Amino acid sequence: MTEYEHYEAVVVGAGPGGATAAQVLAEHGVETLVLERGTDAGSKNVSGGLLYGESSAPYTLDDVFPGVRDAATERPVDDHYIHNISGRKVKTFDLGKLHHHDTDWCDAVLRRKLDSWVAERVHESTRETGGGVLTDVRVNGLLREGGQITGVTLDELDPIRADVIVAADGVNSELARDAGLMDWEEPEEWFQGVKAVVEMEPETINERFGLDDSEGDAHLFSGDLFEGVRGGGFLYTNESSLSIGTVFHLDSIAESRAEPHELLDSLLTHPLMEQWFDGEYHEREYSAKLVPDSKKAAHPSPHRGRLLLVGDAAGQMQAQGPVIKGMNHAVTAGGLAAEAIAEARSRGNPMAAGHRYEQKLYDEGVMAKLRPRRYRATRALSESDTVTAVGSKLLDSPVGTAGLKLFGGLVERGFNSPTLLGMIPDTRLTYVDVPSKIGEVLGTEVDEYSDIEPPELDDRIGDLTYNVDDPHIEVLDNSFEASGVAVTACPVSAEGFGGGCYREESVKSNGSEQKKVSLDTQPCVECGTCAVVADTKWEHPSGGKGVEFKQG
């Protein structure tokens, strides 16, 4: 047998889930090596992002890393609102009850700052047990010997053996796919998030949002401003910037041929936003990522052999209407995975860690949040074409209008009910038609006018930092029928735009003309969208290569 370097535990990915797993493992005296693809922890990571500390969670980030909130998060977020929009009319609901449900604290975060601070602590802790954090290395697959998973393979280094592997390598996890625990076959299992970090001085934020330095706001947006695509927008106040973005069901983006950057611009230029922009707009960074819909994608048994999946790699992203929580579940999963590994190790059977981890996810109620039974029990009916058609017809009728006027308070209470939101169907009726009707019937017209001009797509791409490597994506079928959706669904591509990843071309052959798709991975933001909507072979770039996010 070839002699390879060996560790008791290898953690792949230094985001919140991987960092928590590594920290808890080190506290249990487990020799742990963390392998991170970015030049720095956080340089490959993007989130909305609100980080929750849930009362019911066995692990929160500030429990595992004392001082993280003071040193590495942006602002505490106390108030949460949703704006239901119909043209220029807006009806705002207070989501305070929902926001504070099971919540000890909630902070806005930027991932580059957060993850790099946490990784420094992890490096100190894991070095004490004989490991550490190694950046600029890409884990590209699983090492198998005798048919069993025994470690990981890398682009830059020889394979590394481990008693246990924690895959915290994100939504595009190559380890989860190698193990057969994740695929990219169903667009309806994914959301796509696109985000702009917008410059704003702290005192300006305080003035325009009515805040003190220790306060922050979260705003959600839904209704008719997104061309009928299922999803919505968000705005979170940071210390000296705003995180503003959109999150949509990927199948809806693909079907409508909507362009993500234009959907974001629809939010940025709505008159409602002018109360906060006041004619000023400077974009620090543009970014995008896929987001798993945990109701469908959270793996019920996220392990195989020595491999345990945590966070987005396991589909552990809770997105149920205005409930958007991911990082906190990754933290919990990382802690529970480490617990399971330490317990299995103490009994001399590291192979038992996966089953222990799975049981802990169920015992602690994590899976009940990620895959609510009430959604699965009602989905066949609530998402049927018949129910959707009847609901739309009723909503547009005089009865629907009268009902909203009469029971508007009950509707707002419904938006604050975790039980109801846990069964919300993924249909245009709930994500587009209902909020639009609420805005139309109950809303007040916004009297502001927006003259904001967001950056052009080529400027957004040009402002990002890249360390270009060999192409990491291959188009397997370049016909427009097989891969043309990527031209519009890719967040750095667009119809008629020659500077993005995917481009439509007309090719003349034998007297006929065909539409083909060409690819240039140089401006790729590594979101993985094309892996789902196009016929491609998709991999991450090598360690330290590709896009580098400064904000995240």
Image (cartoon, helix red, strand yellow):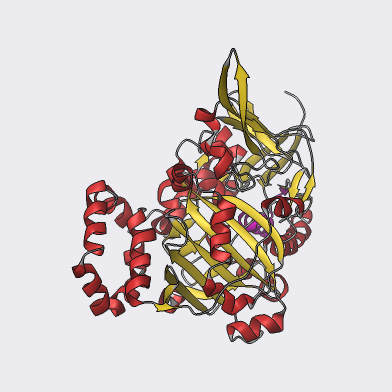
The quadrant holding residue 94 is bottom left
Magenta stretch contains residue 537: no
Residue 320: quadrant of the picture: bottom left
Residue pictured at 78% horizontal, 45% vertical:
544
Q: Position of residue 160 (x, y in %)?
A: 73, 36
Q: Nearer the viewer, residue 152 or 178?
A: 178
Q: Pinpoint residue 433: horizontal percent, then vertical percent.
A: 34, 61
Would you say 519 lies left or right of 477 here? right
**Segment colored magenta:** 15-34
Q: Main secondary structure of the magenta part?
A: helix
Image position of 132 with respect to 273: above or below? above
Numbered label tally: 0
In this orientation, does residue 246 appear?
A: yes
Residue placed most toward the observer, 456 or 211: 456
In x, y percent, where is residue 336?
A: 54, 56
Residue in the picture at 58% in, 29% down:
148
Q: Residue 60: name its quadrant.
A: bottom right
Whether residue 130 appears in this view of the structure is no
Residue sitting nearer the eye, 344 or 5: 5
Image: 388 above or below 81 = above
Quarter of the picture holding the C terminus: bottom right
